């Protein structure tokens, strides 16, 4: 069989790339499982969108991504980002504030007393930075929207075994392609061995909470973050990079230490909140948490998203599509 562009992996990056190529290339997306499957890094109800990074490059990228999210919402006629204020605590908050101010992004310092008045559940944690351009992304709705609006042929339950710049071998056939893109999350490394990614298994807790809570991030080590689930009384809380290193090809088994750290974080941030559900999800990590968006041995690779790429999805899709179109 022949194809114009084959994309391996139907997660956020694969589908965003397909959408960015819509109308410009015929795209075939091959997904080993189903879109949004429970082992993928993109599954689940929500993700945080924020401009706040200490590194000005990421603030600029998030600003550009915000425009792409608005375009995607307008194109699909669906709301994906639910504007939600965010509090940033901890040692990195000053650098985040400086980077936001330099970029002209809306942010203000908020005192502990003002936090107590506005968000009583977060009282007693000290001063913070308040970001107003943050949002809760409907992650599951995003995948469904990309799937519908990518204009690509999507084949689920097709596993790619090996590939090179112009051939993709599944369990049943070899597909010849003008361009091959790999966005297989933690499994990218088994198809493109030259990349040096590692996988950790992260644990996320959903607790019952009052409405009106903000997103929050505390940059103390280990970093902890939380976000409301729009339309429900569930609040999601997790330790960033709190899970163990794993082999992504093995069964995902919850880790007792990571669970204990999650319980501890919930007790610290939302004392007494009822834990309703624990979900597990892999991070596809690079050593410096920078993303891999490049051509390697002629193959376009999007990977190494290190637990913070959802907010950049439509932008990274465009960049990967550009690599396909540039053919360089
Ligand atoms: C718990 C958690 C919380 C997060 N929170 C945030 C957040 O708040 N904000 C933020 O910006 N980011 C966040 N992220 C990060 C973000 O969700 C990920 O960076 C992003 O979703 C990764 O997408 P992906 O397409 O690279 O990988 P994946 O979603 O893992 O997609 C890869 C796909 O490839 C398929 N595949 C694998 N191997 C093959 C094969 N051989 N053949 C065919 N298909 C294959 C898989 O089945 C999978 O569906 C979070 C991640 C996690 C896990």
Image (cartoon, rainbow, N blue to C red):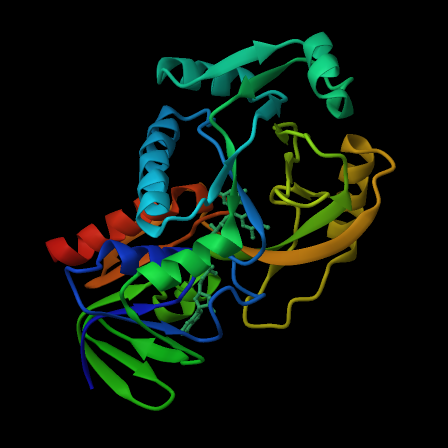
User: Where's residue 141, x and y in %?
Assistant: 49, 54
User: Where's residue 18, x and y in %?
Assistant: 28, 61
Is residue 184 or residue 24 the one in the foreground? 24
252 on left or right of 297: right
Q: Residue 43 falls in which quadrant of the image?
A: bottom right
Is residue 177 or residue 49 the one in the foreground? 49
Q: Residue 25 falls in which quadrant of the image?
A: bottom left
- The answer to whether residue 183 of the structure is visible from this angle is no
Q: Residue 127 falls in which quadrant of the image?
A: top right
Q: Quadrant of the N terminus?
A: bottom left
Q: Residue furthest bottom?
A: 172
Q: Residue at x 42, y 52 (%)?
A: 304
Q: Quadrant of the C terminus?
A: bottom left
188 on left or right of 198: left
User: Where's residue 191, x and y in %?
Assistant: 36, 70
Q: Residue at x 84, y 45 (%)?
A: 274
Is residue 56 or residue 85 the one in the foreground? 85
User: Where's residue 242, x and y in %?
Assistant: 66, 45
Q: Residue at x 19, y 69 (%)?
A: 26
Q: Residue at x 58, y 65 (%)?
A: 38
**Vertical placement of 274 versus 13: above or below?**
above
- The answer to whether residue 42 of the structure is visible from this angle is yes
The mark tally for this picture is 0
């Amino acid at each position: 069989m022949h194809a114009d562009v084959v994309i391996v992996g139907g997660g956020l990056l694969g589908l965003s790339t397909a959408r960015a190529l819509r109308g410009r290339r015929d795209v075939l997306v091959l997904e080993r499982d189903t879109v949004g499957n429970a082992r993928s890094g993109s599954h689940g109800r929500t993700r945080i969108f924020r401009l706040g990074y200490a590194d000005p490059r990421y603030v600029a990228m998030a600003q550009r991504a915000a425009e792409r999210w608005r375009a995607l919402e307008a194109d699909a006629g669906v709301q994906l980002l639910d504007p939600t204020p965010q509090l940033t605590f901890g040692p990195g908050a000053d650098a985040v504030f400086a980077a936001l101010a330099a970029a002209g992004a809306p942010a203000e310092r908020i005192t502990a007393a003002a936090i107590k008045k506005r968000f009583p559940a977060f009282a007693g944690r000290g001063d913070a930075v308040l970001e107003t351009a943050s949002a809760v992304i409907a992650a599951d709705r995003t995948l469904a929207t990309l799937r519908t609006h990518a204009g690509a042929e999507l084949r689920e339950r097709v596993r790619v075994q090996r590939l090179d710049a112009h051939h993709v071998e599944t369990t049943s056939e070899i597909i010849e392609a003008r361009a091959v893109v790999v966005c297989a999350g933690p499994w990218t490394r088994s198809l493109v061995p030259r990349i040096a990614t590692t996988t950790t298994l992260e644990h996320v807790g959903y607790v019952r909470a009052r409405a009106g809570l903000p997103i929050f991030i505390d940059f103390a080590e280990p970093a902890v973050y939380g976000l409301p689930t729009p339309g429900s009384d569930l609040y999601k809380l997790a330790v960033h990079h709190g899970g163990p290193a794993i082999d992504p090809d093995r069964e995902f088994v919850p880790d007792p230490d990571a669970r204990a750290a999650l319980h501890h974080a919930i007790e610290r941030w939302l004392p007494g909140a009822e834990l309703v559900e624990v979900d597990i999800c892999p991070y596809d990590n690079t050593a410096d948490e920078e993303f891999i968006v490049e051509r390697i041995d002629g193959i376009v690779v999007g990977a190494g998203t290190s637990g913070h790429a959802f907010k950049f999805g439509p932008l990274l899709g465009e960049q990967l599509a550009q690599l396909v179109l540039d053919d360089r």
